[in-house]
């Protein structure tokens, strides 16, 4: 069965990370994810995860524009990025986590699309040895550039899949964000079926608006059934911004919606 996780950054803004963990468990979820772990009390988070028997699927390694943790399209950021991956692995391991999301960075006007794509492949190949030694997985995420991330380079799941297949590592997978890719490309189920072997994680939100999954144009229960038929056993992440004032009710309703 597909595991549903909650991104703690988008819900319960009034609560601490540790309080969010307890609340999300109480609602009925066993998995969660977070963005940058640096500004959190890692020991407290790890203790809360253990106490509530919760599992952390992934954290985020670098920012979409590359200003934090380095950019994959920029060769000069190699040392920054390699050090950042070392740091993220160490932090994540303390919380029992073995995955991190990585972003491409923004497009560089002085480089061609082919050059930037090649730079991403080269950077991921360089970091692969670190990942293998630690049994750690990086999740490469394409994002939409129409609404949320103008200037971001990797806005195509097709290109992201080509990159992951070129690197050809069991420790480097594709993060398929259904919200972002519905905006950019559509044809969701066909892409998933063709590339499920390299997809390591999913993100989701309602389109348009990035709100509740049940309030948009995407048939998410249909996609969940597809993933179960394909044998996907990873996490399906909720990364939506609740429109409902009551986030507890929003998350409960979302879980019921996905489980049918």
Image: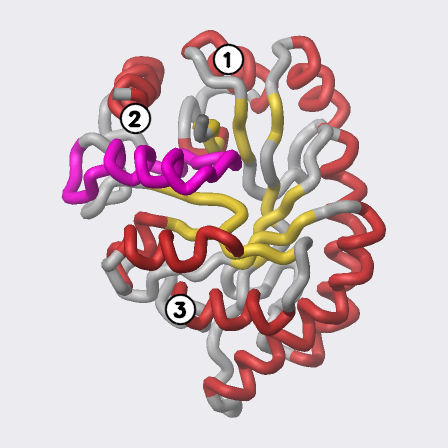
Dividing the picture into quadrants, the one containing residue 49 is: top right
Q: Residues within 10 Å of mark 3 (few under 14, many from 20)?
A: some
> Residue at label 2?
258
Q: Secondary structure at mark 3?
A: helix
Q: Position of residue 188 (x, y in %)?
A: 28, 54
Q: Compared with residue 190, is residue 247 higher up or lower down, i.e. above or below?
A: above
Q: Which span of residues is magenta-colored?
A: 215-240
- In-front residue for pair 234/83: 234
Label 2–label 3 contact, CB within 8 A: no
Disc 1 or disc 2, which is closer to the eye? 2
State yes or no: residue 242 in magenta: no
Give the residue drawn at x 16%, y 39%.
216
Q: Secondary structure at mark 1?
A: helix
Determine the CA span between mark 1 and mark 2: 17 Å
Q: Compared with residue 211, is residue 166 higher up or lower down, i.e. above or below?
A: below
> Residue at label 3?
158
Determine the CA span between mark 2 and mark 3: 26 Å
């Amino acid at each position: 069965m597909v595991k549903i996780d909650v991104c703690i950054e988008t819900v319960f803004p009034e609560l601490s990370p540790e309080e969010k963990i307890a609340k999300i468990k109480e609602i009925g979820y066993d998995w969660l994810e977070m963005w940058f772990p640096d500004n959190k009390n890692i020991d407290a988070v790890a203790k809360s995860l253990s106490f509530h028997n919760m599992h952390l699927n992934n954290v985020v390694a670098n920012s979409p524009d590359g200003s934090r943790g380095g950019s994959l399209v920029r060769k000069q950021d190699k040392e920054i990025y390699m050090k950042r991956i070392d740091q993220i692995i160490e932090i994540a391991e303390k919380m029992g986590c073995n995955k991190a999301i990585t972003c491409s960075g923004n497009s560089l006007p002085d480089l061609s699309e082919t050059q930037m794509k090649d730079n991403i492949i080269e950077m991921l190949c360089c970091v692969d040895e670190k990942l293998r030694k630690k049994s750690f997985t990086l999740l490469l995420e394409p994002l939409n550039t129409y609404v949320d991330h103008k200037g971001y380079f990797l806005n195509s799941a097709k290109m992201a899949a080509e990159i992951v297949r070129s690197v050809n590592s069991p420790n480097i997978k594709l993060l398929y964000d259904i919200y972002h890719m519905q905006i950019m490309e559509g044809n969701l189920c066909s892409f998933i079926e063709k590339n499920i072997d390299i997809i390591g994680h999913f993100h989701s939100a309602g389109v348009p608006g990035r709100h509740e999954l049940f309030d948009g144009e995407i048939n998410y229960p249909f996609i969940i059934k597809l993933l179960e038929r394909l044998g996907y056993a990873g996490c399906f992440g909720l990364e939506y911004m609740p429109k409902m004032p009551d986030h507890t009710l929003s998350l409960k309703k979302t879980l019921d919606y996905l489980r049918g």
